[in-house]
Image (cartoon, helix red, strand yellow):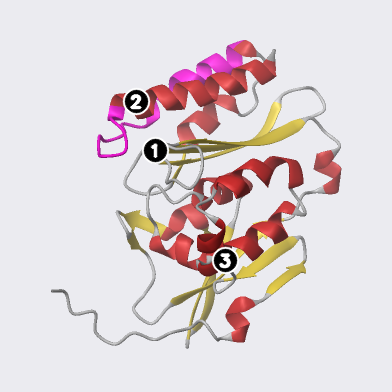
Amino acid sequence: MHDLGDIIYLGQVEALKSITEENGWLEIGAGVTLENAYAAASRHYPKELSEMWQRFASLPVRNAGTLGGNVANGSPIGDSMPLLIALGAQVVLASVRGERELPLESLYTGYRQNVMAPDEVLARTRVPLRDPAAAQRAGWLRVYKVSKRYDDDISAVCLALSIQLDAHGQVARASIGAGGVAATPVRARQTEARLLGQPWNAATVQAAMAALRAEFQPISDMRASGAYRRACLLYTSDAADERSS
């Protein structure tokens, strides 16, 4: 048996259950349930988050589990992290020494390992609100989840892509979050680099697909083989290719 030591229950800390909007950010306390967190985010991204929200675990789990717990747990197949990475979310870590912010993908150092000091807690997650000016330009956010069951199942692969074009039809911003392809939730930086500054067309997407295929070497486990996960990455990027035509 493993001795867990002292455990502190934080479920009744009101400061951790707040949802606020300020200075272009949606701030979600670590104690906010998944259901309430996704409801708040979907008000700003209703079309993009609808299916993902419904496929995230089950309603009882979403009403009991918290976004902060999902993020801090750091599972490589946690469904919220790829989406949050694609959105450019940040986490706020707090201790008696104060607070510090960092990009969500920078929280993790290895399998279920993170940069938090022994006296730090994850206080809240900050999600950028949709920029009204950017919303007038071409761009899109898509989340793809592959699992053995359509409903109430953990992902074998989860891929979230956020693409923004400039006035000339070139990729001005690319943010791609992936789960199930590495020891932690990750950002596909090499693939993003292949997209930035390029015209949004089939050739650009094909080059990005090749970069995505080479960027990750997924492992095989009980949920899926590494080869299957690589095939899923190509399938989801092929769906992006259809949007470029």
Amino acid type indicated by mark 2: Tyr
Residue 71 vertical placement versus 100 (above, below): above
Q: Is 131 placed left or right of 14 in the picture?
A: right
Question: Along the polypeptide, which appears first: circle 1 or circle 2?
Answer: 1
Which residue position holds label 1?
Answer: 156
Which residue position holds label 2?
Answer: 228
Q: Is residue 169 magenta?
A: no
- State the residue at coordinates (38%, 41%): 180
Which picture quadrant has residue 14? bottom right
Q: Is residue 213 magenta?
A: yes
Question: Along the polypeptide, which appears first: circle 1 or circle 3?
Answer: 3
Dot 2, how many residues are within 10 Å of its Cα: few (below 14), some (14-19), or many (20+)?
Answer: some
Callout 1 touching callout 2 (CB < 8 Å): yes
Give the spatial CA distance, label 3 vs label 2: 32 Å
The magenta stretch spans which residues?
Answer: 203-226
Q: What x and y, as percent, mark residue 116?
A: 39, 70
